[in-house]
Image (cartoon, grey):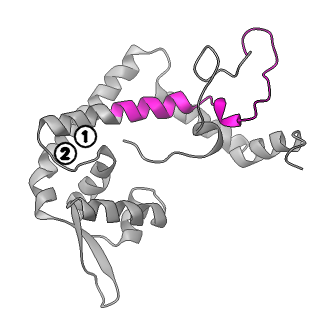
Amino acid sequence: MSDAETSGATSGATSGGTPGTPPGAGHGATPERSADPTEQSLWRPLRLLQAAMDAEIGRLYAEQQIEGLKPSYVMELLRLHARGPMTITELAASVERTHSALSQKVAAMRRDGWVTTVAGDDARSKKVALTDKARREVGRLAAEWRATEAAIAELEAEIPYPLSRVVGDIEQALARRGFRDRIAEKLAEDPAWG
């Protein structure tokens, strides 16, 4: 459950009273232009929430003495268990990540003892495969995945507007008008952009 953090609005810190609310917002004032634009971020609380939830999953691993496992490794480990060894390109496509990001993650998982590389279909290719350590733990990782999904479903049932619905609504809005175009429009209004 974690990983990617995008730039701009999703990676900055919030300031002012309400998390994600620009200074002066909600008080009838126009937000001030800060020397540090990262002091304002509407989506930083979401990133922090996900990081806190991942930390809780990490605590469960520690309590079970599963050493060196990060929550961000679990999808790839379970995918390799289900589908067998894959090239980085195949694994990246399977989990919808870039080759570069997956290559870095595989290097970290190899360093932590969860995956290894084996000969591929031809002499030039290599495939990522689970280590014995990973194969011993995969049943518990699948159990954690199912429990996490069930806990998320329970949380979504408790709130009036589930995050999965928010994501779907945002995807629909972006299909109507892309994020790049939205940002470009705002940049055109900002003399600092040129």
Residues at marks 1 and 2, CA–CA distance in whole angstroms:
6 Å
Query: What amino acid type should be assigned to the residue bearing mark 1?
Result: Trp
Query: What amino acid type should be assigned to the residue bearing mark 2?
Result: Leu
Q: Can you tell which mark lies on residue 104? A: none
Seen in the picture, residue 15 relative to 179 is either above or below; the reply is: above
Q: How far across and down, in percent of the image, does residue 96 sit?
A: 45, 56
Element carrying mark 1: helix
Q: Is residue 108 visible?
A: yes
In the image, 50 versus 139, the foreground residue is 50
**Image quadrant containing the N terminus:** top left
The answer to whether residue 118 is left or right of residue 51 is left
The answer to which quarter of the image holds residue 155 is top left
Q: Residue at x 82, y 18 (%)?
A: 30
In the image, 113 versus 135, the foreground residue is 113
Q: Can you tell which mark lies on residue 145? A: 1
In the image, 23 versus 150, the foreground residue is 23
The answer to whether residue 127 is left or right of residue 174 is left
Element carrying mark 2: helix
The answer to whether residue 23 is left or right of residue 5 is right
Residue ranking furthest to the bottom:
123
Q: Residue at x 35, y 88 (%)?
A: 124
The answer to which quarter of the image holds residue 42 is top right
Disc 1 crowd, CA 10 A, few/some/many (<14, 14-19, 20+): some
Total label count? 2
Q: How far across and down, in percent of the image, does residue 76 sit?
A: 31, 56
Q: How far across and down, in percent of the image, does residue 94 sit?
A: 38, 60
Q: Can you tell which mark lies on residue 141? A: 2
Range covered by the magenta-colored residues: 25-53
